[in-house]
Image (cartoon, grey):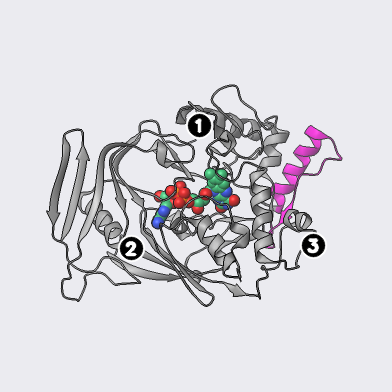
Amino acid sequence: MSLRLSVSPRGISFREETEEGPTGGRGSPGPAGGAARHTLVCVLVLHDAPLAPLTTFRLGGPADRLITATTDAEVVAAVREADASGTPLLLIGGGSNLVIGDKGFAGTALRIATTGFALDGTTLELAAGEVWTDAVERTVAAGLAGIECLAGIPGSAGATPIQNVGAYGQEVSQTITEVVAYDRKTDETVTIPNAECAFSYRHSRFKADPDRFVVLRVRFALEDADGMSAPIRYAETARALGVEAGERVPAAAARETVLKLRAGKGMVLDAEDHDSWSAGSFFTNPILTEEEFAAFHARVADRLGPDTAPPAFPTGDGHVKTSAAWLIDKAGFPKGYGQGPARISTKHTLALTNRGGATTEDLLTLAREVVAGVRDAFGITLVNEPVTVGVSL
Ligand SMILES: Cc1cc2nc3c(=O)[nH]c(=O)nc-3n(C[C@H](O)[C@H](O)[C@H](O)COP(=O)(O)OP(=O)(O)OC[C@H]3O[C@@H](n4cnc5c(N)ncnc54)[C@H](O)[C@@H]3O)c2cc1C
């Protein structure tokens, strides 16, 4: 039985619903083949609900309905209901990678607020709604290595596999063993091993096929290295820690150093700091073929002089990654660029920010100006990293 509490301008109402089958838990397979089980679910449903406060940009219009789910069963029930009625569905975790249009969302927004932190030896299982940066802190406090350099990334654990979050030399694809998800196509809960997640740079099968999987739980294999971190891979972190790349340091020191570096770039959430009213990096770093990179290099030489070499990070498969922040800066968009309420962060060229009072349209106007400027200067079209809802660049 499910008890549905509905809040609208017309008042508050309750509705009882009967559901069949288990709708969550560790890899439970859904209703097929088993006797009906009854779960008592009480979910809060808001109508014409503002979404801006649920995003780190603080932008976007209202959703027709907003449901907050605190258990896997509630998540699955809400998704099933939306799918059965053909209602568009928007999943929201921490809202730190979302650009929602000013008109809002004509459908059901489902905020995933489930909790669950289970550490067994070096095996970690997180419910999708767990706050990611808190989970990192707890694993470091337990003396474990593997995600310490991902400290300070806002949002929920369940969203980390979506774009394979990464920073300072670590990506979740290095430690995730499996993702437990509700498959909207087959109406069952599935366990997807790492090898089937199609992880790549800021991408995964979940991002490629956004209407199929709802992440319920994420499992990780961490490392017990006697309180030491994983080998430090990122040059900037190694420099700040005073070690060579490849060395280990106490995991707590790695986490604290990363947090300090991030704060200096406005990359840690701080309600007082408009530089963090963002989605972090707004653009992904372009990955070019060797021929494309050669053409780009020639353009850089033409524009900035023969001695200027663009940043180049070979990916090992015949491609070269370059820096979106460098491109933006060299195309004439320095830190703090912009006149209106949406501007480039004063601390990081790659973050577009809401200085207060911006609309999504203001943000997109700035983003389009940057994309066009970089394309004109260097022939490269930047791609946005955050997910857009009801709008596009
Ligand atoms: C200041 C700042 C710094 C940042 N730094 C980094 C960084 O260093 N590295 C990095 O990779 N990212 C970074 N980000 C981006 C963002 O924090 C991450 O992408 C994060 O994982 C998003 O989590 P979220 O819960 O906020 O997702 P949301 O913004 O709520 O959602 C993002 C996408 O995931 C989907 N989604 C959310 N939850 C689920 C679920 N349970 N199942 C299926 N789909 C789901 C949503 O529908 C949406 O498409 C930063 C953002 C900010 C604001």
**Label 3, residues with CA under 10 Å away: few <14, some 14-19, many ≥20:** some
Q: Which residue is disc 1 drawn over?
A: 364
Identify the mark nearer the N-term, 1 or 2. Answer: 2
Q: Which residue is disc 2 drawn over?
A: 183
Position of residue 271 relative to residue 166, above or below, is above
Considering every residue shown, the one lying at the far right of the view is 307
**Residue 180: mark:** none
Identify the mark nearer the N-term, 3 or 2. Answer: 2
Kind of residue at disc 2? Asp
Q: Quadrant of the N terminus?
A: bottom left
Label pair 3/2, CB-CB below 8 angstroms? no
Disc 3 vs disc 2: which is toward the camera? 3
Q: What secondary structure is marked by label 2?
A: strand
Considering every residue shown, the one lying at the far top of the view is 339
Disc 1 residue lies near ligand 1 with CB under 8 A:
no
**Label 1, residues with CA under 10 Å away: few <14, some 14-19, many ≥20:** some
Label pair 1/3, CB-CB below 8 angstroms? no
Image-based side of 198 in relation to 310, left or right? left
Residue at (76, 54) in percent of width and height: 240
Position of residue 202 relative to residue 225, above or below, is above
Measured in 3D between alpha carbons, the distance from the residue under mark 1 to the one under mark 3, in whole angstroms, is 41 Å
Magenta stretch in the rendered image: 290-319
Kind of residue at disc 3? Val
